[in-house]
Image (tube, helix red, strand yellow):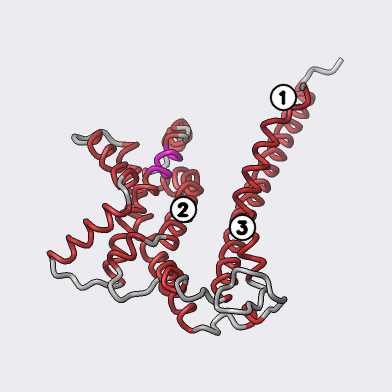
Amino acid sequence: MTFIRRHILTVVAMLVLVYLFVPIAVVGVLSFNNPASDYNTQWNEFSIDAWTNLCGVPAVCQSFGVSVRIALVSTIVATILGSMIAFALVRYRFRGRQSTNLLIFLPMATPEVVMGSSLLALFLNLRFPLGMPTVIIAHIMFTISFIVVAVKARLQGMDPNLEQAAQDLYASPRATFRYVTFPLVAPGIAGAALLGFALSFDDFIISFFNAGTLVTFPIYIWGAAQRGIPVQVNALATLVFFASLAIVLIAQFVAWRRRKALQASVVDSDVNLKALSMDTLPRS
């Protein structure tokens, strides 16, 4: 019983991770399958045709490229606007600040069906043609809330004494932001941008309402599921997963290198201080 109490949390965490990653593993395995029918749901024989010819079905690559372009544009715009909103909410006091904080959370709490249908009604009333611009506008609208929340958390966790120290050393506001504030908040902005990109690339419901005849990658998969999803979809999905995993591992490695460098600099400083104190001691 003691062993179970000590390791129950580890066992539960491992089971949850297995539950999360088994479907991803199945998608990866089926990307090397040569299905006997249009439905790639059962293993037939090993094949790398999907990997050597990712664009064997042109519609797959076209929809994938559309989703990437939409995600990039909406992420860039939403990250810039969301970061500015986060700085305003954390650093300044103005009338309507509490109301703005509440409004920021509304897109996160609103069901996507409601948001997608309301945006569709807005575009139709404005006689705005549906397509890539409307999808980009819709994605910016719902991703900006997540970016604001992520950047706000980073700003609120910063030590204000660092900026005050730079100002005490006669640094201008622009120099303080460039050399102190921005480097400290940059990891939070980068993480928020990655989150926004993933949300935009993965979105189906809001895109489906506002895409018109435009076909994004999730919309293509939804349509292809009724007649059989090509194996190339599994290969591209696996490729996206490993690309995301590589970004996370690189970020962790860079953070580890920075911690090691900081620890080494602290140790060197302690050694230098001890050596200096020994040199200043009076000799008998």
**Residue 276 in the figure: left or right of residue 205:** right
Q: Amino acid at mark 3?
A: Leu
Of the 4 image quadrants, the one containing the C terminus is top right
3D distance between C-alphas at marks 1 and 2: 35 Å
The tag on residue 195 is 2
3D distance between C-alphas at marks 1 and 3: 32 Å
Q: Which residues are magenta?
A: 149-155
At 46% from the left and 30% from the top, the residue drawn is 161
Q: Amino acid at mark 1?
A: Arg
At 66% from the left and 48% from the top, the residue drawn is 18
Q: Which residue is mark 1?
A: 5
Where is 267 relative to 281, above or below? below
Give the SS element for disc 2. helix
136 in magenta: no
* Structural crowding at the residue carrying mark 3, measured as other residues with C-alpha within 10 Å and reported as few (<14), some (14–19) or many (≥20): few
Whichever of callouts 3 and 2 sits on the residue coming sooner in the sequence is 2
Disc 1, disc 2: CB below 8 Å?
no
Whichever of callouts 1 and 3 sits on the residue coming sooner in the sequence is 1
Q: Amino acid at mark 2?
A: Leu
